[in-house]
Image: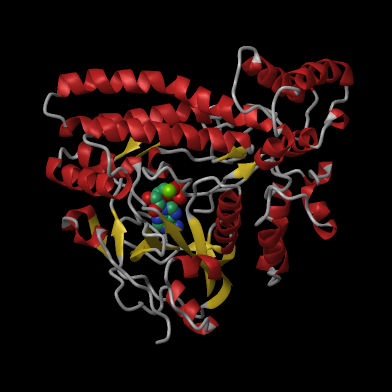
Amino acid sequence: MTLTIPFDNSYARLPAHLYSRQAPVPVTAPVLLAFNDALAHELGIETDRDADELAAIFAGNRLPEGAAPLAQAYAGHQFGGFNPQLGDGRAILLGEVVDRAGNRRDIQIKGAGRTPYSRMGDGRAWLGPVLREYLLSEAMHAMGIPTTRALAAVATGEDVYRDTALPGATLARVAASHIRVGTFQYFAARQDIAALRALYDHTRARHFPDAGSPGEMLDQVIAAQADLVAAWMSVGFIHGVMNTDNTALSGETIDYGPAAFMDTYHPVTVYSSIDRHGRYSYDNQARVIVWNVAQLAGALVPLMPDQDAAIAAFTEMVNAMPDRVEAARLRRFAAKIGIAEMRDGDAALIDELLALMVAGSADFTNTFRDLAHGDARAHFPDPAGYDRWHARWQARIATERDAKMRMLAANPALIPRNHRVEAMIAAAVAGDMDPFHRLLSALSAPFDDPAPENRDLAAPPQPQEVVRETFCGT
Ligand code: AMP
Ligand code: MG
């Protein structure tokens, strides 16, 4: 074996009922589709890049030395309803490495076969969601937004059956950890205080070393989640399934499922086919994250010596969270219009532009990008309102230094547009990985004006290309 991964598996050293030891289930004919060399280097993985060996390892057919494969237990609120028993039903944690920068990272294979948490599922994934997550998570990373990363995608050579037979695949992903709000809920719901404490100690050491108590950790989680959702909103990202099992304590974006970037701006946009009531619509994300954090707060209460006092204190923190999310959102949008330090009137300036964009069905990404270049008038069918706004905006940013630079760094020129992602998946299913690699490469520099050969990737969909619905792919 020529590949070495410097594993150091701390989760596997936790009490045994936090997870189930489970090896990946081998697949018939693994073929490497994509491998993230830069990330592998970051992780200290040594490989001579033998595609067959990488395929065998990241499909789960060959266990690398030092791996301690396991499926994590977790619970979660799905669309508001509590499920006490979810867990890794189609993902196996191979283990952890401490990367070159000294940060502990999980390496997990998604689609690795059945586990004790699979319930009715087959433990597998199909190519579409694997490539979608690969592309979207790497694009998010390139935009500077905290996210899990994609290390490898492998075709399994097996069909998986959803409504129809689809080509199977695995995704090797890397995360600061896979600890979720739902992981805490799992043990809190069982009143398993010893396990809850072990999980808390592990999480604190790993993500919040300077938090002195569960309350201090909660405060840091609130700050990280407020900023994460604000960052999502600033690039038009809609996660799609913000269940509590899909909210990571690390503050990284996790579980891309039906995730999508908006083309035309509208605050109630929903793509996920299963989100019938818009619980996880674009603008509801700001409210749902508070709800999710409230569930974490509830799960931390059993750790507190004085539970009544803890409930009072945590309630106050959760009640103050909407203002923190809104402040983070406004900071992000202020930067999008060139403002470094907000003043009175700036929030109104931001929200008036957004209202004009709704009225004009403006493309979210291109409106802000063109504004960064000076003028977005072409996006407004009734330019009179925009012209008035533009004059006020010009007057406001006349006093800002480096407004243009700030705007070019806050407003991506390229996002993974849904119609491109869908076309990329269709091509990959037909055996053509070129569109995937082209998108991946273009999206690695989202804040640069695209090279001439990539300008088409910045264009919104033609009416017949618009994607209205995305699917979890489970
Ligand atoms: P998700 O909506 O993808 O976050 O998944 C919710 C839950 O369903 C998690 O416990 C997953 O592990 C489980 N799950 C999703 N897809 C499958 C599958 N194909 N086989 C087994 N479990 C699955
Ligand atoms: Mg999930």
Residue 302, given in percent of the width and then of the height, sits at: 17, 32
Quadrant of residue 467 within the rendered picture? top right
Residue under the point 78% across and 32% down: 371
Looking at the image, can residue 56 be seen? Answer: yes
Furthest-bottom residue in this view: 1
Residue 138, given in percent of the width and then of the height, sits at: 57, 56
Image: 222 above or below 414: above
Image: 230 above or below 69: above
Image: 268 above or below 411: above
Report the side of 473 relative to 174 (left or right).
right
Report the side of 190 relative to 252 (left or right).
left
Residue 122, given in percent of the width and then of the height, sits at: 42, 61
Residue under the point 44% across and 78% down: 46
**Numbered disc total:** 0
Residue under the point 63% across and 38% down: 235
Q: How is the rendered protein coloured? A: secondary structure
Report the side of 471 relative to 311 (left or right).
right
Q: Quadrant of the N terminus?
A: bottom left
Looking at the image, can residue 283 be seen? Answer: no
Residue 409, given in percent of the width and then of the height, sits at: 67, 42
